[in-house]
Image (cartoon, rainbow, N blue to C red):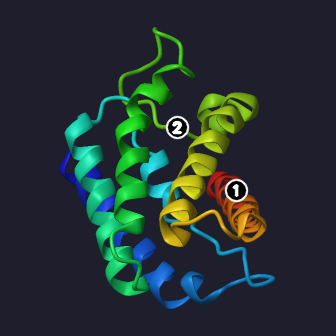
Amino acid sequence: MTQDILKRAIWFVILVVAQALVLGRIHLFNCATPLFYVYFVTMFPRSYPKWSILLAGFFMGLFIDIFSNTPGVASASLTLIAAIQPYYFQLFIPNESPENMEPGLYTMGPTRYYYYVIPLVLLYCLVFFTLELFNFFNLLEWVKCVCGSTLITLVMIYAFEIAKRK
């Protein structure tokens, strides 16, 4: 268990630094920003305590907010995803699966993994950009940001999952 906590702490630091220094500065077509740190919350295994996932999501969002100058937006959005993730993950795994089963492209199968990760990333982007823009006067910009960021984040997650296997 200590080794798993250490591994997740290292992932935490790597994803926060990558988002703050590199990914947060990318804005494709002035609307699509990769939000790869969402992957951190989506990869918690079945046996993890729900309160620790919630705290990890909140603190990840808090550090992203501090470095990205988005006061409370990332922490609120990521805390919501962290609250949903354990219950949502249960829908995609059989009851006889091992307790320490971790979500992944190869552990769940491609179809189940897609159905698992796409709604979580989409929900995160919906909440994130709704809170960030905080109005619907420019609905087209909001839709472009949500769709573009969801798409680029999903591409990064899938590419990482494929590379992780090899």
Give whichever of discs 2 and 1 has the lower sequence position. 2
Judge left or right: residue 96 versus residue 48.
right
Q: Please give the name of the residue rendered at 41% of the width and 55% of the height, measured from the top-left corner.
A: 78
Marks 2 and 1, how far apart in space? 15 Å
State which quarter of the image contains the C terminus.
Answer: bottom right
Q: Where is residue 14 in the image (x, y as percent from the top left)?
A: 42, 75
Nearer-the-camera pick, 87 or 126: 126
Local crowd size for mark 2, using a 10 Å CA cut-off: few (<14), some (14–19), many (≥20) = many
State which quarter of the image contains the N terminus.
Answer: top left
Mark 1: secondary structure: helix
Q: In this view, does 15 lie above or below 23?
A: above
- Circle 2 or circle 1, nearest the eye: 1
- Asked which quadrant contains residue 44, the reply is top left
Q: Please give the name of the residue rendered at 39% of the width and 85% of the height, measured from the top-left corner.
A: 69
Local crowd size for mark 1, using a 10 Å CA cut-off: few (<14), some (14–19), many (≥20) = many
Q: Residue 103 carries which label?
A: 2
Judge left or right: residue 123 versus residue 109.
left
Q: Position of residue 99 (x, y in %)?
A: 36, 23
Q: Which mark is residue 154?
A: 1
Q: Can residue 11 be seen in this view?
A: no
Nearer-the-camera pick, 45 or 85: 85
Q: Please give the name of the residue rendered at 63% of the width and 40% of the height, measured from the top-left corner.
A: 119
Mark 2: secondary structure: loop
Q: Which mark is residue 90?
A: none
Residue type marked 2: Pro
Judge left or right: residue 81 versus residue 109.
left
Judge left or right: residue 96 versus residue 125.
left
Q: In this view, does 22 lie above or below 49?
A: below
- Asked which quadrant contains residue 106, the reply is top right
